[in-house]
Amino acid sequence: MQKQKSRYISLKDFFEKWAISKIDINQHPDLMELQGIIKQL
């Protein structure tokens, strides 16, 4: 049996290749807070 290729883009690809480059983190205080928390880990 052959595995059928997905017709949809994966969320990982969407976020890594498109969304991250489009978001201005400085306009979203919640994302800035999350970034600070992640940096402390």
Image: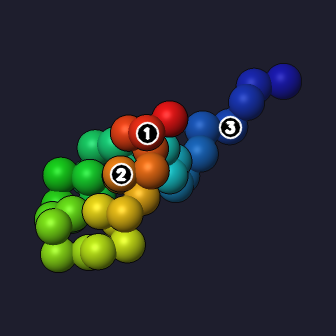
Task: Determine the residue located farthest toward the top in the rendered image.
Answer: 1
**Left or right: 34 as drawn, with respect to 29:** right
Please tell me whether mark 3 or mark 1 is closer to you in this view: 1
Q: Are marks 1 and 2 in contact (CB under 8 Å)?
A: yes
Q: CA distance from mark 3 to mark 1?
A: 42 Å
Q: Amino acid at mark 2?
A: Gly
**Left or right: 40 as drawn, with respect to 22:** right
Marking on residue 36: 2
Query: Which residue is pictured at 26% across the width and 52% down the height?
Result: 20
First in sequence: mark 3 or mark 2?
3
* Mark 3: few/some/many CA within 10 Å (<14, 14-19, 20+): few
Q: Which of the colour schemes (rainbow, by chain, secondary structure, one colour) is used? A: rainbow
Image location of residue 39, percent across then percent down = 38, 39
Visible in this render: residue 14?
A: no
Marking on residue 4: 3
SS for dot 1? helix
- The vertical placement of 30 against 12, above or below, is below
